[in-house]
Image: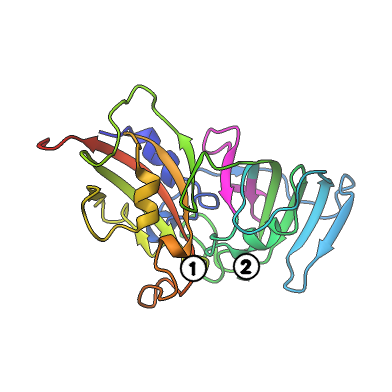
Amino acid sequence: MISKSLVVLFLGVTGLLISCGDSTEKRKLTTKKVTRDNVADPSVISKKKLENGLTIYWFKKGAGDPLKEGDMVNIEYEVKLKDGKIVDGNKLANKKKLPFLIGFNLQTPGWDIAFKELRVGDKVKVLIPSKLARGDKGIEGLIPPNADNWLYVNILEKNKPTRSAGGTRVWLLEENKDNKLTFNDKNAVIFHAIASTPSVTEFVNTFRLDKPFIYRMSDHGLVPGLKKALMNAKKFDRLFVVVPPEEAYGKEGYLDIVKPNESIFYNVLVMDVVKPGSK
């Protein structure tokens, strides 16, 4: 059975893990009160205000590559409210850094907008207007309705895919090397997944009903690119997977959920790999 701490890490980061829909919005994170933010911070060396009201303040200009949609970066970050309360961040998750995939964070669209203005090495604070954050809903017990967000972020590095399979990109974020049994054409895989496209957030979230997928290689219905990504996965592996349209639903799309020629992002946690005949 998976440890409680691993589940908390998988679900506990509102910004980075592409959020977790209703299940995330109903939980109450521990917060920390700090001093009120000062827009006129003398350590700011540059500023850019976009037409939508999002404003970026640079503490440091990086010399690395500009960021674009589809990039996965490792970051240090925290999110504060106007009164200085810290409501999210890698330190709250007890991590030195956390991954963020640009292009799929629809519940807080200001993140994607801001990151596309940045490059590796940038250290900034970003004023995200409420309409580009959690809007008039907020998050119960954590972020009030119509609350502007302050995102403090340090872009540490781009994170290259661990492997590619037919155009599908896979990042192995966590691995328990003690586990040897892998998913293949004989064994079955049991996994939780949160799936999003650039236009629809979390059209799949198996955590909500606590009903993970169970698949064998011979089963129909699993997106081909995701099946390739899961090959050789082991119990407790945690993966980011981006499946291109040709390995997903192609030019036809899927109902009104996946548009034609859309990529799909999967945040995957492998619960178990089992041999045939296992209970």
Measuring 67% from the left and 52% from the top, which residue is drawn there?
151
Q: Residues within 10 Å of mark 2 (few under 14, many from 20)?
A: many
Measuring 26% from the left and 37% from the top, which residue is drawn there?
272
Measuring 50% from the left and 70% from the top, which residue is drawn there?
199
Depth order, front residue of 82/151: 151
79 inside magenta stretch = yes
Q: Is residue 126 visible?
A: yes
As drawn, 240 above or below 250: above
Give residue 68's position: percent from left, percent from top.
Answer: 67, 57
Highlighted range, magenta:
78-101
Depth order, front residue of 226/128: 226
Depth order, front residue of 233/8: 233
Residue under circle 1?
A: 262
- Discs 2/1, front: 1
Judge left or right: residue 6 versus residue 221. right
Q: Is residue 82 visible?
A: no
As drawn, 10 above or below 112: above
Amino acid at pointer 1:
Glu
240 inside magenta stretch = no
**Can you tell which quarter of the image residue 160 is in?**
top right
Residue under circle 2?
A: 132
Judge left or right: residue 155 versus residue 237. right
Give residue 212's position: percent from left, percent from top.
Answer: 26, 50
As drawn, 212 above or below 200: above
Amino acid at pointer 2:
Leu
Q: Quadrant of the N terminus?
A: top left
Mark 1 falls on what kind of element?
loop
